[in-house]
Amino acid sequence: MSTKAKSSLFLQGALDSSPLILAAIPFGLIFGALAITTGLSAWATLSMSLFVFAGASQFIAVSLLASATALPVILLTVFVVNLRHMLYAASLMSQVENLPQKFRFPMAFWLTDETFAVVSNHVAGKKDTSGLHWYFLGSALAMYTVWATCTVIGIIMGQQIPDIASWGLDVAMLVGFIGIVVPNLKFRADWACAATAMFSTLITYHWPNQTGLLFSSFLAISVAVLLDRRVKVGVEPIHE
């Protein structure tokens, strides 16, 4: 593949991700500000965005740290929340299994909800997915750069505007997640899993130390696995 073709795919990945990146900007700002106001140092806050790079998990970790939650509970909660990335990786395995490790390792680290959604849409219905890794990296690096930059800006804002966490800027990321999830609810099993997670989360919202989130995640995953065994996923779309 020519350098021009690689650059074109890289740029296209970044451009296709732009709507989701825009939704993530307020989320990055509010994370940086919230982490600072809860007592995390600027370097620790930035390090989370650079080396963890998982928005939802970062928010959960910061809130649990602020409430003096035991470290094992924090680690378990973050692990469960990030289990979905294993499903993402499995879904893309056939497209990347022949790539050298110099591509697969960074792709694994930069795999996010947004990049997975964009890449999945890009490969849908295509037989030739050569160069997919360049498209993936374009999406992932654009998101990574914006997320880290917004974290830095959020840190500065948090130091200057202590009550910024109460502005409700994180609603933009909720809208972004809805935009990712809803178009992919194509089968009965998908809807059952989403409904289970939603209702269980509402019921267990006030459980301490985010244990409601843990319970809801396990419950939704269990429902998905059970239905996957009973129904041939992909054969019975919800619209049929």
Image (tube, rainbow, N blue to C red):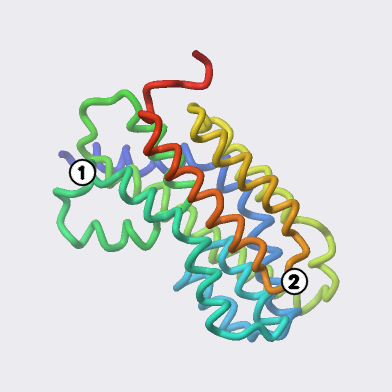
Indicate whether 189 appears above or below 93. Answer: above
Q: Of circles 2 and 1, which is in front?
A: 2
- Which residue is rendered at x = 75% and y = 71% of the image? 157
Crowd rating for badge 2 (residues with CA inside 10 Å; few <14, some 14–19, many 20+)? many
* Residue contact at pointers 2 and 1, CB within 8 angstroms: no
In the foreground, 135 or 76 = 76
Residue 4 in the figure: left or right of residue 174: left
Q: Residue furthest top?
A: 240
Quadrant location of the N terminus? top left
> Image quarter for residue 236?
top left
- Which residue is rendered at x = 75% and y = 74% of the image? 158
- Residue 125 on image: x %, y %: 32, 23
In the foreground, 226 or 113 = 226
> Image quarter for residue 107?
bottom left
- Which residue is rendered at x = 69% and y = 86% of the image? 68
In the foreground, 206 or 180 = 206
Kindly identify the amino acid type of the residue bearing the numbered disc 2. Answer: Met
Residue 197 in the figure: left or right of residue 163: left
Q: Disc 1 on helix, strand or loop?
A: helix
- Residue 110 on image: x %, y %: 39, 58
Kindly identify the amino acid type of the residue bearing the numbered disc 1. Answer: Thr
**Measured Cα–Cα span from mark 2 to mark 1:** 40 Å
Image disc number at residue 3: 1
- Which residue is rendered at x = 55% and y = 41% of the image? 193
- Residue 228 on image: x %, y %: 40, 38
Q: Disc 2 on helix, strand or loop?
A: helix
- Residue 182 on image: x %, y %: 58, 33
Indicate whether 224 appears above or below 237. Answer: below
Image disc number at residue 157: 2
Indicate whether 74 appears above or below 8. Answer: below
Crowd rating for badge 1 (residues with CA inside 10 Å; few <14, some 14–19, many 20+)? few
